[in-house]
Image (cartoon, grey):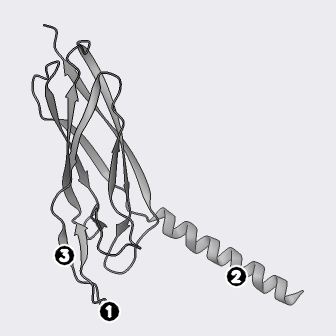
Amino acid sequence: MRRRLVLMLAGVLLAGTWTLAQARRPTAEIAPRVETKAPRPGGTVRLVAHVRLPAGVHVQSNKPRDPDLIPTELTVTPPKGMSMVDIVYPKASDLKQPGSKLLLAVYPNEFDIVVRVRLDARVVPGAISLPATLRYQACNDSVCFPPARATLSWTIAVPKG
């Protein structure tokens, strides 16, 4: 009986610690920006996802050096009339962690991911929504938090004529 009580108490304490860690998990703010001023049917549109994390927080690059680390990944879902050209991630910075021989490839607390899409030549003029999801794992100098996802959407205004 006593063993059961101790195990139950340990479970409650661990659950409380997990909940507290979740409550403090840094979240990414993402500002979608359309950089192509007058998108035309058949043309390419340049988009930017500006990512901002709290000070002192970083994320792994899209190609971490350690295969056990979670990469930062932007998934874009083009609607009908649009196709992906490419996604360009920023250059990663090297980060030395105490006790590790391997340098980490990370992005700082503020960075841009560039997306280029091609509009179909017969795309219908008007506003087109392009949704995306950023998967990331925020870390500070002592702990990595559980992975998270943030959604964003660009609105591309295709003019008539």
From the image, tell me which residue sits under label 2. Answer: 10
Q: Residue 97 in the image: state x and y as whole percent.
A: 28, 84
Residue positioned 23% across, 63% down in the render:
109
- As displayed, is residue 49 above or below residue 53? above
Residue at left offset 14%, top offset 30%: 44
Q: Which mark is residue 20?
A: none
Expressed as whole percent of the image width and height from the top left, the position of residue 27 reads 37, 57
Q: Disc 1 or 3, which lies upstream in sequence? A: 3
Q: Which residue is mark 3?
A: 94
- Report the front residue among 72 and 67: 67
The answer to the question of whether label 2 and label 1 lie on touching residues, with beta carbons closer than 8 A, is no
Q: Could you tell me which secondary element the residue under label 1 belongs to? A: loop
Residue indicated by mark 1: 99
Specify whether 133 is left or right of 2: left
The residue at the point 32 percent across, 74 percent down is 140
Which quarter of the rendered picture does the C terminus lie within?
A: top left
Outermost residue, left side: 37
Q: State which mark lies toward you, 2 or 1.
A: 1
Establish if 11 lies above or below 98: above
As shown in the figure, which amino acid type bears the numbered disc 3? Asp
Q: Is residue 160 above or below residue 77?
A: above
Q: Earlier in the sequence, mark 2 or mark 3?
A: 2
Residue depicted at 39% across the width and 77% down the height = 143
Badge 3 marks a residue whose secondary structure is strand
Q: Quadrant of residue 84?
A: top left
Mark whose residue sits in front, 2 or 3? 3
Mark 2 residue type: Ala
Q: Using the image as rendered, state which of residue 37 and residue 91 is in the foreground.
A: 91
Distance CA(mark 2)–CA(mark 1): 30 Å
From what the image shows, is residue 123 above or below residue 155? Answer: above
The amino acid type, in three-letter code, at marker 1 is Gly
